Image: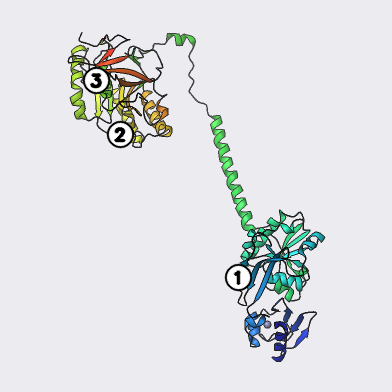
Amino acid sequence: MDATERFVDALVNAGSVVKPNGQDRWLAQCLAHDDGNPSLSVARGRGQVLMYCFAGCLIEDIAGAVGWSMDSLFDDPKGVTYEYKAQGRTVRRVHRSPSKVFRQDVIEKGSGDLYVPDGVDLDGAVKAGFPVFIPEGEKDVDALTRLGEVMATTSAGGAQAWRKADWSSLAGASELIVVADPDEPGMERATALVHHLRTITPGVVRAVKAKVGKDAADHVTAGLPVADMLPVDVDYDPEFEAAVQSEMDYRRIKSEALHRERAAEAAKVSEKLQPKTLGEVLDLQFEEHWVIPGLLERGDRLVLTGVEGGGKSYFLRQISIMAAAGIDPFSLAPIDPVKVLVVDAENSERQWSRSAKYVTGLAEKWGVRSPRNEVVINAGVRIDLSVPADVNQVHQLIDEFQPDILQIGPLYKLVAKEISNDSDAAPLIMTLDSFRERGLVLLMEAHAGHAGKQSKDLRPRGSSALLGWPEFGFGLLPDEENPEMVELARWRGDREQRNWPTGFRRGWDGELPWVPLRGSSDEFEGGVK
Ligand SMILES: [Zn+2]
């Protein structure tokens, strides 16, 4: 006697009116509620009693009404085991306990992902074009195949696990019917599984749900034909549709805004071109473009590199202070005196006071005017040219003093962040160019990347963008044998032919700090005149 027969006997013994209702089925008075008309459907499931009360009584209560516990409803009180097979071998076992605890043993991986009860030929059914039902659990598959008399299969592990299974054995099926449990995970599974199965078969793939009860097992236990299952629309998801609509609205609005922006841009007329007649161009009076004739003209950028302590600051001071006194810093020829603005982020006022005295004395002696009021110095203050306020202040000083030369640097101290690539250098270069556009000469110091006693690499460190940028890229390269002599070495070709000395000698007392050498002879021109 199996559990089903024992349970039917128990019902009869407890006073229920029980009638056979076809093979393996009974219709009984439910003892868990006051049941005038028999409304309890009982069926023999595989290894367990199946029942459904149309009044909605819980299985526990129906069993309890005859004094039974849940495990009594199973042929084996431990529960039911579902075997998954591949080529006749059991590759996976799913055990279901009476309290609905599932345990899965995977014996062989990689095949037999679908549960097919013994005696059911799924592959044959697919080939023959029969519809295949795909409920959520093995119990449903058993109920559908035994009581519903249809083909059915499922994958192990509940609503989420179908994604892990290989469904390809259903490829080419004529009709696949996913049975959705009427809860949220069940509906999500059905929707996603239908869409997946549509990618593996050209046949009809649709979803249904039980008309009574909570799953396919309840539906067929209740004695209803599978044709009575209710259709589920998996192609309409109001939330998804709303999300799509909102995304489309967003894109449309964005595209319209972009279109308007472009139209506005397209309608703009710039005022960059200011044509003049040939006659006007010929009659133009140009301001003298030289700041130091033959050496530096307005807009020139000069970057001087060299080793630390190699005399870069002395070199630039000599140019600025001599020019401010109205003399060429190397030939000592008279020139129109210039005004100089210094932003020195490295040397302090004390250092300036000490080291500019000597060259200022010479400039006062040889020049056409004293440079004392023509050079304006900001010394020893770190500024950050990536900060607008600091940039604005430099522009304000340019407005105020109208300098011809802006001596600024060293480059790597003009921004707070280290300059280690072209992107770091780009904003600094743009800012310095904004100063240069005011008609200035930019005199700048930079540290050489790898210069040392052994190296002649005088290129500025940090960024290759700095290499091509200035009109003049010079490095002070000491003569290995005679440290008093330095070569004015190019790390980039001069953009124009100018009258720069080829090298310098450190001046003796009474001479310029840097005495120019020209050509290969050591003849110098900067001595006392
Ligand atoms: Zn009932």
Element at label 1: strand
Query: 142 or 340, which lies in front?
Result: 142
Report the amino acid beneath label 1: Arg
Where residue 176 sits: x, y (%)? Answer: 75, 61
Q: Which residue is at a point 56% across and 38% down the rendered structure image?
A: 258
Q: Quadrant of residue 235?
A: bottom right
Name the residue that disc number 3 marks.
374
Q: How is the image coloured?
A: rainbow
Q: Label 2, label 1: how many angstroms apart (C-alpha)? A: 71 Å
Q: Are marks 1 and 3 in contact (CB under 8 Å)?
A: no
- 327 over 453 or under it: above or below: above
Report the amino acid beneath label 2: Ile
Q: Are marks 2 and 1 in contact (CB under 8 Å)?
A: no
Report the amino acid beneath label 3: Glu
Element at label 2: loop
First in sequence, mark 1 or 3: give its number: 1
Q: Point out the frontmost of discs 2 and 1.
A: 1
Q: Point out the frontmost of discs 3 and 2.
A: 2
Is disc 2's CB within 8 Å of ligand 1? no
Element at label 3: loop
Q: Point out the frontmost of discs 1 and 3.
A: 1
Q: Residue furthest right?
A: 128
Q: Can you say which quadrant of the picture contains the C terminus?
A: top left
Query: 503 or 298, which lies in front?
Result: 503
Q: Are marks 3 and 2 in contact (CB under 8 Å)?
A: no
Q: Can you say which quadrant of the picture contains the N terminus?
A: bottom right
- 495 over 31 or under it: above or below: above
Name the residue that disc number 1 marks.
103
Name the residue that disc number 2 marks.
383
